[in-house]
Image (spheres, helix red, strand yellow):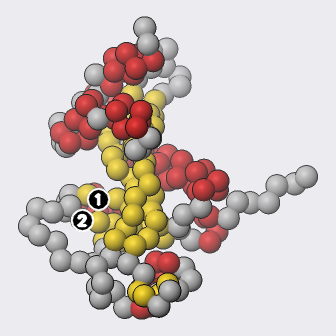
Amino acid sequence: MSDETKAQKLISIFVCEKDVDIENFLKSKAIQFEKLGKSRTFFIYDEDQDEFQVLAYFTLAIQVLKIPEGMFSGNKIKKLDGLSANMRGSRITEFPSILIGQLGKNEMYAGVISGSKVLEYCLATILEGQVRLGGRIVMLECKDIPYLISLYERFGFNVLERDYQEGALLQMIKILEEDEIIEPKKDV
């Protein structure tokens, strides 16, 4: 059995009726996105179980955060960039970001893992990658559901203030703090 066939079998039993987009992405796009290098999908599972069971998953990708010209003050742009609000005489409007593209729990094991724990695993993975690649902005898009927004806010995400159309996904960002992004010195 090929690795792809094994992966398809594992994800075929993932259920997320609360948000079918999360389930559909995993079942119909995750492997293709993985092959194309568009994103990486990470499974959370219980190592103590004899049988591999996907408790939750998250997908990460590189994304450009685009801010429409004139939307933010120079101070807000400088905070996003970390150094300046301008580059070569023009206002900076695009920022490299780490995108949490998908994040979901398998409803078959709903009581086994919390959304907070899934987000902890996700952010730990982001910080591991950040040590090697850099980056300071983490972004995600979520439905305008109070408990979701509250969860992300507890982890330092803020809704990006802009005009959203009815039913549009909210963009949330987290700027990694210096103590989060600098690799600790190792004893030699």
Horizontally, is 131 left or right of 18 in the view? Answer: right
Tell me: residue 85, above or below residue 55. below
What's the distance in space between the residues labelled 1 and 2, CA to CA? 5 Å
Q: Residue at x 62, y 71 (%)?
A: 178
Instruction: Identify the image quadrant of residue 44.
Output: top left
Identify which amino acid the numbered label 1 is placed on: Glu
Q: Which mark is residue 170?
A: 2
Along the line of sight, which residue is nearer the eye, 173 or 88?
88
In the rendered view, tell whether residue 179 sits above or below residue 75.
Answer: above
Q: Position of residue 177 (x, y in %)?
A: 57, 71
Query: Residue at point 33% right, 86% down?
Result: 72
Q: Which residue is mark 1?
A: 141
Q: Are marks 1 and 2 in contact (CB under 8 Å)?
A: yes
Identify the element where label 1 is drawn. strand
Is disc 2 surrounded by few (<14), some (14 to 19) or many (20+) residues within 10 Å? many
Question: Which residue is depicted at the point 46% across and 65% down?
Answer: 96
Work out whether mark 1 precedes mark 2 in sequence or the reverse, and give the earlier one.
Answer: 1
SS under mark 2: strand
Q: Amino acid at mark 2?
A: Leu
Instruction: Check residue 181 in the rendering and tell me which mark sits there, or answer none.
Output: none
Residue 105 drawn at (x, y percent): 32, 38
3 displayed left or right of 159: right
Q: Residue 76's image quarter?
A: bottom left
Answer above or below: position of 110 versus 137: above
- Depth check, front residue: 178 or 74: 74
Report the quarter where the N terminus lies.
top left
Locate residue 54, reporting x and y percent: 39, 28
x, y percent for residue 187: 87, 54
Q: Residue furthest front?
A: 88
